[in-house]
Amino acid sequence: QRWTDFTGYTLEDSIGPDMWNNLLHPDDQQRARQRWGHSLATGEFYEIEYRFKAKDGSYRWFLGQALPVRDKEGQIVKWFGTCTDIHDQKLQEFALREREAEFTTLANVIPQLAWMADETGSIFWYNERWFRFTGTTLDEMQGWGWQKVHH
């Protein structure tokens, strides 16, 4: 019922080998075809994040997952799958990435050497000015590596 309410498709409209792909966002269609084709060919667990078109024309993010059901001989006889609405979670994820990018840009343009440490004092992040000034890499500086460049 949720499928028909969301897409506006009747059960009869929803049957066919490529019907579901037609409702995916154009940017997701090829990746979804490839991933589903791989699962069909190998019997591997199917999992993908993609956008489905609603009956109002908007798109929402879903997590698609499917498992094969096998007979006694190990042959796939059918698949059970779900599409879980993860739209709000994806929007929060995108917003977080944008804030992180803005922070990184800001941290890399300030004239100071900047760093972050965890609760034990182990440093896990430096701005780019630190690396340009010290001539080091993150691998060299992680943890307590900063002591190598201090007098």
Image: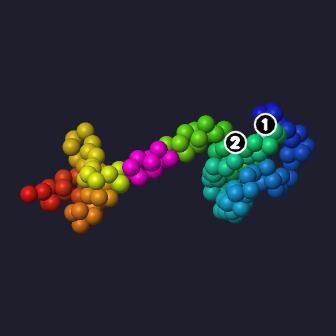
Q: Residue 100 location in percent, x, y?
A: 44, 47
106 to 129, vertically: above or below: above
Decide which of 14, 86 is in the foreground and name it.
86
The answer to whether residue 47 is seen in the rendering is yes
- Whether residue 18 sits left or right of residue 68 in the image: it is right
In percent of width and height, residue 147 lies at 14, 55
Q: Residue at x 77, y 45 (%)?
A: 53
Q: Secondary structure at mark 2?
A: strand
Q: Mark 1 highlights which residue?
A: 6
x%, y% of residue 131? 27, 61
Residue 141, located in which quarter of the rendered image?
Answer: bottom left
| Observer-nearest of 66 and 115 | 115
How packed mark 2 is, by other alpha carbons closer than 10 Å (few <14, some 14-19, many 20 or more), is some
The x, y position of residue 96, in whole percent, is: 49, 43
Q: Is residue 138 magenta?
A: no
Which one is earlier in the sequence, the residue at label 2 or at label 1? Answer: 1
Callouts 2 and 1 close, C-beta under 8 Å: yes
Foreground tag (2 vs 1): 2
Say whether residue 82 is visible: no
Task: From the image, tell me which residue sits under label 2.
Answer: 60
